[in-house]
Image: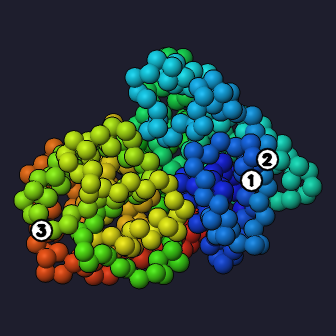
Amino acid sequence: MRLLVITYYWPPSGGAGVQRTLKFVKHLPALGVEPTVITVDPEQGAYPVLDASLAAEVPASVRVIRTGTSEPFGSYKKLTGRKQIPYGGFANESKTSLQQQFFRFVRGNMFIPDPRRGWNAHVLRACEELFAAGETFDAVLTSSPPHSTQLIGLALKKRYGLRWLADMRDPWTDIYYSKELNQTRPARWLDARYERQVLEQADEVLVTSPDTKRLFLGKSARLTDAKFHVLPNGYDESDFREPSTPPTDALLITHTGTISEIYHIELFLAACGECTRRHPDVNLRLRFVGKVSAGVQQLIHDHELGDRTELIPFVPHDQSVGYLLRSTVLLMAIPDVDHNFGILPGKVFEYLAANKPIICIGPVGADADTLLEECGAGRTFPYLAYGDMLEYLEAQVAAWRVNPNLDLPPLNHSRYSRYSLTERLVKLIK
């Protein structure tokens, strides 16, 4: 079988956005599917972070077609003097700057559904060339964000009648930072119209969590439950070949990925600070690997944890996994935003594979909490549950005094391996 895969994020792009499609493509050939990938030329694309090491994950047999693009990010960097483009949720941008508020308004009202829509015309030309040369495909998979990529799938469905799988890693009009775009009523209407057209016209819609499925199902009376399939993110077993080696001289809590004020970990940090005062004999330490906002860095110092905290900028994916394996406990936080019950970060599956206790700060009963309960891998604390957080930390301290290795027994998470999830994808393609 032949599958056309259209994805904006692809090596050398780094970060969470590239992992899902990359791992699908990595395992598809072994399962009898020949993927052809269409992506953006990295010299022209706009990636928040880079990770050249991920190129080694692409099978040699996979054809990758790179196209040009027409996007506004070059002008954005010139006008603002910034070297980086905005992260998802604007975690690296000022929320109060008038300049940034202006650019968010422009982004929300002039570039619908998103600024990367300028890539679409280039992809459609590349597809036309493939079909004109006699190439045939059994299906096309479009992966988003950026959700403008789904409009490519919509166009291919209308023009060529291809079987179309829309893989939507995040909500669309309900994404947690949508309010910050300051969209006018016409802009919101158009964005919702695109979303509804994609959901109605796609043959299958893939989502990463049950709550996101419920969210999308409510967008149109024409949608049926059978069209939606929950294929969560996962972990790649080959990434976890190294042994777990938690430190013996410190109780080390590690967080990987982006963290900002909307994750509301201030009371967790307060509990850490109090725990260090109550137990000065235990070397409690924190480590953040990835983007840490200035506000969170200030909170770390406010709670007198500066000397106990290590801040590590973005690292290649394999190094990030290494930091997990060299930790005692892992920290995950769900942003305190609308519709956060369906937020199931990709990192949680790698946290599971590391077999460490997981502290999750977020809503109890949400999809992330349910997953941790199901696997017996950790505990979720509401944002304001200071007492419970402190009690849990003290329990970890007591256990650490007995044995500094707090690793959990092997967890029942094999169904979340990337290979198992790709097997499910193949069934949907067929």
> Where does the image place residue 281, in percent across and percent down from the top left?
12, 68
Contact between labelled residues 1 and 2, with CB atoms less than 8 Å apart: yes
Amino acid type shown at disc 1: Ile
| 390 sits left or right of 413 in the view | left
What distance separates the C-alpha of mark 2 from that of mark 3?
58 Å
Q: SS class of the residue under badge 1?
A: strand
Image quadrant occupied by the C terminus:
bottom right
Residue appearing at x 57%, y 45% in the figure: 48
Tell me which corner region of the image, top left, top right, bottom left or bottom right, holds residue 85. Answer: top right
Q: Nearer the viewer, mark 2 or mark 3?
A: 3
Q: Nearer the viewer, mark 3 or mark 1?
A: 3
| 42 sits left or right of 244 in the view | right
Contact between labelled residues 1 and 3, with CB atoms less than 8 Å apart: no
Residue appearing at x 64%, y 69% in the figure: 57
Q: Between 19 and 391, which is closer to the camera in this rendering?
A: 391
**Residue 281's disc number:** 3
> Where does the image place residue 409, in percent across and percent down from the top left?
27, 82
At label 2, counting other C-alpha atoms closer than 10 Å, the crowd grade (few under 14, some 14-19, many 20 or more) is many
**Residue 38's disc number:** 1
Residue appearing at x 74%, y 42% in the figure: 44
> Where does the image place residue 15, in percent across and percent down from the top left?
53, 54
Name the residue carrying label 2: 67
